Image (cartoon, rainbow, N blue to C red):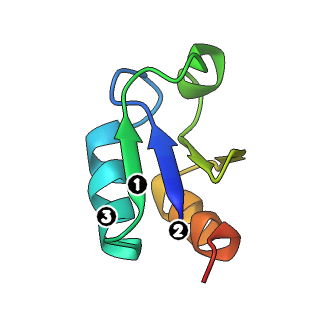
Amino acid sequence: MNEFKTCDQCSGFNGKSVAERLKKLDENAELIVGCQGLCAIGAKMPFVIVNGIIITADNEDELIERVKESMIK
């Protein structure tokens, strides 16, 4: 089972939008949305922690593609 963690408080991306897209990727995954203590990263770019690994990208679309590649299938 996949686990996704992201922040809805960081100013560098729309965490709520990312969370919605993550739900669509794997509706059975555990999704944790809230401060992840990665404020320096989240102020500059979107991120998701996928199964314990931090995934970053320049934009939300690229992030979702990278998350797809990192998921347990």
Q: Amino acid at mark 2?
A: Met
Query: Residue 52 at what x, y percent from top left?
Result: 69, 45
Q: Residues within 10 Å of mark 2 (few under 14, many from 20)?
A: few
Residue at screen point 31% across, 64% down: 23
CB atoms at circles 3 and 1 under 8 Å apart? no
Q: CA distance from mark 2 to mark 3?
A: 13 Å
Dot 3: element = helix
N-term-proximal mark, 2 vs 3: 2
Dot 2: element = loop
CB atoms at circles 2 and 1 under 8 Å apart? yes
The single residue placed furthest to the right in the displayed view is: 53
Q: Nearer the viewer, residue 19 or 44?
A: 19
Q: Is residue 57 above or below residue 12?
A: below
Residue at screen point 58% across, 35% down: 45
Q: CA distance from mark 3 to mark 1?
A: 9 Å
Dot 1: element = strand
Q: CA distance from mark 2 to mark 1?
A: 8 Å
Q: Is residue 56 above or below residue 11?
A: below
Q: Amino acid at mark 3?
A: Lys
CB atoms at circles 2 and 3 under 8 Å apart? no
Using residue 22 as the reference point, say whether residue 3 is left or right of it. Answer: right
Q: Which mark is residue 1?
A: 2
Q: Residues within 10 Å of mark 1 (few under 14, many from 20)?
A: some
Using residue 8 as the reference point, say whether residue 44 is left or right of it. Answer: right
Q: Is residue 63 above or below residue 69?
A: above
Q: Residues within 10 Å of mark 3 (few under 14, many from 20)?
A: some
Query: Residue 53 at what x, y percent from top left?
Result: 73, 47
Q: Which residue is mark 3?
A: 23
Q: Which residue is mark 1?
A: 30
Q: Amino acid at mark 1?
A: Glu
Query: Residue 70 at what x, y percent from top left?
Result: 69, 68
